[in-house]
Image: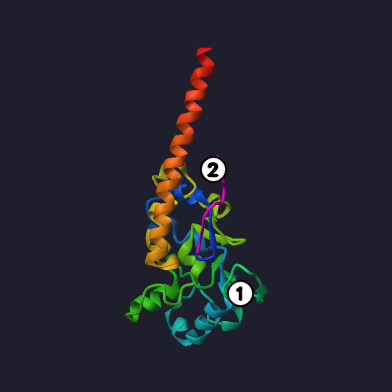
Amino acid sequence: MLNKFEKKINGIWIDPIIFTFKFVKACDVCICSGECCYYGVYTDKKEYEKILAHKERIVQEMDDSQTKDVNKWFEQPEVDPDFESGIAVGTEVYNGKCVFLDKQGFCTLQKIAMKDGEFKWKYKPLYCILFPLVVCDGVLTVDDEHINSMHYCSKVENQVSTVFECCKDELIYFFGEKDFEELSEYRKEYLFQLEEKIKKENNNLRNQVEK
């Protein structure tokens, strides 16, 4: 029998649902307008401080649908062991979306990095990068509750890939190349075991029918 959480990589338990959960092939802001960002996101205290360190540049890139009042960008910090520093700081919602989401559905934090020739995720919070993946109680899993609230990603007819397949770059960013290879090997092992389990169950069912 398969255990739900039997593998830990770099201190994070792996929920094997990431290998089978269906999702869209790739994010397309032109379709969803950054809908996954409507509710804001929790940032690590270090990410929060990095963002504030570049507040002048961020303000320059904001449009008239966003607030340029830095005091309205973040919620109060709170203790959360799933974050590296142990402290999480949520982004505020303004005009029905994350304060850093512009009117076209693009992330201002990613825009300034790309415009300035930096790595695209330099200023972006980890949980924005990982979505639809999330780390909850030390387990890397799928944020299915959030997915279900969206008009495009929640539709079965649009889910043509798996979370693992569509988030390879994000997983490499999160784990690093070496640990990602370990994750890939675990995926192969898990899917093989799952296939064998299904075969066994089907054989048992056929035997019962034949009796």
State the residue in front, 174 or 153.
174
**Residue bearing the label numbered 1:** 89
- Tell me the residue at 41%/45% (across/down): 158
In the image, which residues are magenta? Answer: 1-9
Residue 134 in the image: above or below residue 62 = above
The vertical placement of 138 against 15, above or below, is: below
The residue nearer to you, when weighing 24 against 133, is 133
Q: Nearer the viewer, residue 85 or 33?
A: 85
Q: Amino acid at mark 2?
A: Leu
Q: Nearer the viewer, mark 2 or mark 1?
A: 2
Q: Quadrant of the N terminus?
A: top right
Q: Amino acid at mark 1?
A: Val
Please tell me the numbered disc located at residue 2: 2
User: Tag 1, which secondary structure?
Assistant: strand
Say how the picture is coloured: rainbow
Residue at 51% across / 48% down in the picture? 17
From this viewpoint, is residue 187 visible?
A: yes
The x and y percentages for residue 123 are: 45, 77
- Label 2 and label 1: CA atoms lie apart by 36 Å
Disc on res. 109? none
* Vertical arrangement, residue 48 with respect to residue 161, above or below: below
Please state the horizontal and vertical placement of residue 130, each as a whole percent of the image.
47, 63
* Quadrant hosting residue 108: bottom left
Q: Residues within 10 Å of mark 1 (few under 14, many from 20)?
A: many
Sequence order check, earlier mark of 2 and 1: 2
Which quarter of the figure has residue 61?
A: bottom left
Kindly state the secondary structure of the residue where label 2 is placed. loop
User: Is most of the magenta stretch helix, strand or loop?
Assistant: loop
User: Do residues under tags 2 and 1 come within 8 Å of each other at their CB atoms?
Assistant: no
